[in-house]
Every structure is written in C-alpha cells, then in structure tokens.
Image (spheres, helix red, strand yellow):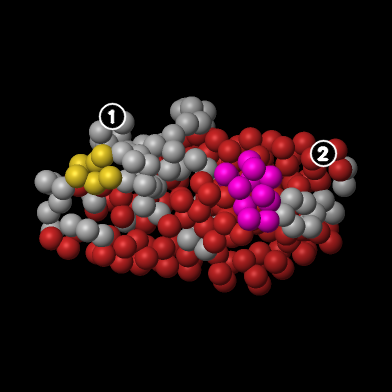
Amino acid sequence: MKSTALLTAALLAVVFTTSASAQNGSPFSYAEHTPGARLVAEGKRSYDAGQYASALTKYEAAARWADKFAQFNIGVMHLQGKGTEFDPARALAWFQLAAERDYPMMLTMVEELDAMVDDPIRREAERIRVEELEPQFGDEVAIERTHRRMQRDRRLATGSRLGFAGFLRIIDRNGFSRDGAEFYAEEKWDFRQIVAIETQRMQALGDGRVELRELELDDEPERP
C-alpha cells in the first residue's frame, strides 16, 4: 500500500466532504431539521480549527442519525490519522457504510481505497462494517430511529401542536426570520422523504447533471 496514494485520497475526500456536508449553510436547506446536520456543521468547524478529536466525536454522533456525510468524514479521519490512529481497514468500513445508498462519489472512494489495500485489510474492513457499524449506524436501523426523533421534535416545536403555523414568525438558529408554515412544513420533518431527496440529488451529482452546491427543495422560498 503506497502512503502517498493514501494521502492523496484522503485530501481529495476532505475537499468533497467540505463541500457536500454543509447541509445547514442555508436557512432553507432541505435537511436543516435533521439531528445530524447541526452536528456535521459543528464537526467541520472543529476540524477546520484543528480540533480533530472533537470533530471525530461530533461526526460519530451525527453518524448515529443516518448522516452519510458524517460517516464518510469518519472514514476520512481514520485514513488521515487525525483525531484517531491511522486505520485503513476502519476507514474502508466507514466508507462502505457511507456508500450504502449508492451515492456515486462515495462509491468511488470505496473503489479507490479498496484497490490500494491488501486482502487482510479488506477482510478486517468487512468484519468491522458487519459486526460493529451496521448494527448501530446502518440505514436499516438508523433511518427509522432518525424519523421517530424528527417526528417527536416537530410535535414538541412551538406552534406545531396547533395544526396551523402560517401566522407564526420563527427566528432560526442562524438568526433568520422565517415563515412558520415554511419552517414547520411536514416534508421537512419527514426523514424518509429527506433521504429520498438527498439520494436523488446525489445521484444527479454523480451523473454530472448539477453543480456541487447547497441542495434545496425546488418549491422553497428564496433566501431573504
């Protein structure tokens, strides 16, 4: 395994995650209410500040909420040896988990790293993914867990219990004034639908049909 090739792969991965994981950079992001979005943003800030252990902890917390960008970032950090020991087997396992929705850019990273390692590392990566990661972080368990959490959060949110939020004005965590009906729109709290939207858009990115930028619902209002 060539260390220079691994370093190049790691640096390319950081460029990708820095762009794609800024899910709550816009106040109208399709994923703004997901529990993983805030943690990914906090993790990136910690990473950029060189606080790698803190970044890894935040990414791991986001990974529990079925956040594929967080899972990918964890793989990057194990590949770089930042915030943790250099571990290509564990990096490959996390990349494989992040790629389970077949996001093309993540599949590419799996293929590239898999081609660099030997059979013992591949076998260890398979063991880690099957025995350690999928039972806690895989979509089979994490999507439903996240959906239940978001439905609970919506019920507890101010105004949502009234069944109508059109006259409310919301000041979100970014300090933007928001229309209540837009903020509490049911589709923005339905994690299954969010996964479907994200999957569609990531597939489009892989096909080269759109630019890598903030992803928004087509029918959302423009940012003020």
Q: Amino acid at mark 2?
A: Ala
Residue 48 lies in magenta, yes or no? yes
The residue singled out by tag 2 in the image is 5
Magenta range: 44-55
The residue singled out by tag 1 in the image is 224
Residue 196 lies in magenta, yes or no? no
Q: Secondary structure at mark 1?
A: loop
199 vs 142: above or below? above
Q: Nearer the viewer, residue 157 or 101?
A: 157
The quarter holding residue 137 reads bottom right
Residue 32 relative to residue 48: left or right: left
Identified at 11% across, 46% down, the residue is: 167
Residue count near mark 2 (Cα–Cα under 10 Å), binned few <14, some 14–19, many ≥20? few
Q: Quadrant of the C terminus?
A: top left
Q: Amino acid at mark 1?
A: Pro
Residue 90 place in picture, x, y as percent: 73, 59
Identified at 44% across, 34% down, the residue is: 214
174 vs 65: above or below? above
Residue count near mark 1 (Cα–Cα under 10 Å), binned few <14, some 14–19, many ≥20? few
Residue 160 place in picture, x, y as percent: 19, 58
Q: Is residue 110 visible?
A: no
Q: Secondary structure at mark 2?
A: helix
The quarter holding residue 103 reads top right
53 vs 104: above or below? below
